[in-house]
Amino acid sequence: MMTALLLIASLVHAQTELYDVPALSRADFNRLAAASSVPLYWKSVSSGTEPLDPASIDPVGVNADLSYYVKDGRFTDRFRRAYLSLAEARRQELVRQELDQGRPVVLVSDFKGASPADRALVQYVSEAGKVIDDLYLEQKGALRLKDSVPPSDLASRALFWRNQGPWCEAPKTEHDPFCSGHPAFPPKRCSAYPEGSAQDEEYCRSLDSALLSPFTVVRRKGPALAAVPLTEVYGEKMRQVSKALLRAAQSQGPEEAVLKDYLLAAAQAFETNDWEKADEAWTAMGSRNSKWYLRIAPDEVDWDPCQVKAGFHVSFGRIDTASLEWQDKLSPLKQEMEDALARLIGPSYTARQVAFGIPDFIEIVLNNGDSRMSRGAVAGQSLPNWGKVAQEGRRRTMVMTNIGEDPESKAVARQKAAELFDPEALAYYPEDKEPGLLGVILHEAAHNLGPHSDTKIDGKGPAEVFGGRLESVLEELKAQTAALWYVDLLLRKGLIDERRAKEIYVRELFWSFGHVSLGLFTDSGEPKPYSQLAAIQLGSFVKDGAMERLPNGRFRVHFDKLPASIESLMRRTGVIKATGDAQGGKALVDAFVSGPDAGLVPVAEIQAKLLKYPKETYLYTVLY
């Protein structure tokens, strides 16, 4: 017990005020004191600043004695205990509010009747996933805190598990200093950077290119900083993952030869930190030569305060054979999509020969680590982000088909749409899942088109040119704007009709509103790439007259003007990325996020409409 208390004491947030906890407001102090039978009242003062000091406290009750709490002009130890109890009560309130912003949805995958090989695969991947969860906790700086959350504090432990750390993420609570799943209010400091580092924008921009490799962490080596391989820091757990993958590979027969190759290559990568062979084996898999989808690696960077370091994750699912139809339709268009984008961008970008796979549809079985979100789910991914496979445009892409498809989630989504769109636009909100899936397919395909995350500009990668934070926003803006821009290509090719095109537009605009409602920055000031791209898109469309905010707060979509507005934004974004125009990229983002055009998208109003609906928290039941 003493060890836990000492740990808690050592983790207290440096920015707190009284007794090393966040400062209670006067209103919360008085409200919580009354609810907790603490006989104290924090009185107002004429200056209006209302500082909490001994002179500002009155006792409550007939012939009440303040000396228990204030003596010789100072707060007593009894006051300290009372204040800390009120601070803890406030924390518990916020923990509940954080949890209440999620609505549990369980995805059940039952393999009890499957073949021995399938059951063994599920068992060993699940075991690897548990270790990946701990690896990701360690990357986030949360693993060391896990055991010091009191066992009796069930709500805080639930928050810690759901958020993979004690830090709040839901939009109503993430910026409140009292929202924490740990009684010591530890600051968010990931392990990718040295202890004591600021991990803010200025610090991130100070890192030179040698420190930006995604498969390293930054450590002090004498007076200098050095990039240290993941295996040197997380080697023990990475070897545990490797052993589980080797056992999974041994369980597979010749009918899953490509999966076995990937399992063996990934097992080796977790030992060596060399991911190229694993990427090659992974991109050789597909829905026509394996019934499984598995990606286990360090990949995405959104979790990282500098947004350059790759987070460990598992995405494991079964191939949904419905993907084969759209693969056949879209595969012949890949080069045409690249060439069209190059023409739009102009002379600053030359079209490449592209060879990426059209997305596989999968029914997700299990997400671990960076792929398991506290609220919502990753609808699609295009990986890897770096290396030879990425440079040669051979990424593999997936789209999850069993996310948001339960009856309750579909009903809630339509209710939200009715609060956002006027009746004409709402008439095109789709009843089936294909428009949403097509939007994700086009988004993920676009990550492989045009200037992308591995494009070099004067020998420098995008993270060096733009900074990791800005590059994350620009790359996602490119992909999502391209997803809308390519709708017209599908229409011209006869793959969809005009109604389907409008359904895709409305579904993707709905997606943008949803991300705007989550807020544009994290609690520590990092940009939320999806939210910021959504604000840029919606603001641009309103500014161009392609969307109109009506007096009742709903939006009308002018479908006749929308394609031109999309193309204008696509061209501007493509040129910025192709030329490495960091100043132009910052100006574009700032204008719609915090500058003169930010008011075109009323964030607070959208939040008021959408945040009253708890967002899905996906739970995974796997039976074998």
Image: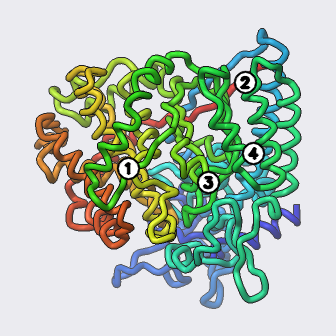
Q: Is residue 340 visible?
A: yes
| Mark closest to the chain's N terminus, 4 or 3 | 4
Where residue 132 sits in the image (x, y, percent)?
75, 45
Identify the secondary structure beneath mark 2: strand
| Mark closest to the chain's N terminus, 2 or 4 | 4
Please report contact status of discs 4 and 1: CB closer than 8 Å, yes or no.
no
Nearer mark to the viewer, of 4 and 3: 3
Query: Is the residue marked by circle 4 packed among few (<14), some (14-19), or many (20+) residues within 10 Å?
Result: many
Query: Is the residue marked by circle 1 packed among few (<14), some (14-19), or many (20+) residues within 10 Å?
Result: many
- Please, what is the three-letter code of the amino acid marked with disc 4? Ile
- Please, what is the three-letter code of the amino acid marked with disc 2? Val
Relative to 177, is 416 on the left or the right? left
Residue 351 circle label: 1
Report the quarter where the N terminus lies: bottom right
Nearer mark to the viewer, of 2 and 1: 1
Q: Could you tell me how far apart the alpha carbons at marks 2 and 3 are, in whole angstroms?
A: 33 Å
Q: Which residue is mark 2?
A: 622
Q: Residue at x 45, y 62 (%)?
A: 471
Q: Is residue 284 above or below residue 117?
A: below
Q: Could you tell me how far apart the alpha carbons at marks 2 and 1 are, in whole angstroms?
A: 44 Å
Please report contact status of discs 2 and 1: CB closer than 8 Å, yes or no.
no
Q: Is residue 419 above or below residue 369?
A: above
Q: Which residue is mark 4?
A: 132
Nearer the observer, 523 or 33: 523
Q: Residue at x 23, y 45 (%)?
A: 566
- Please, what is the three-letter code of the amino acid marked with disc 3? Gly
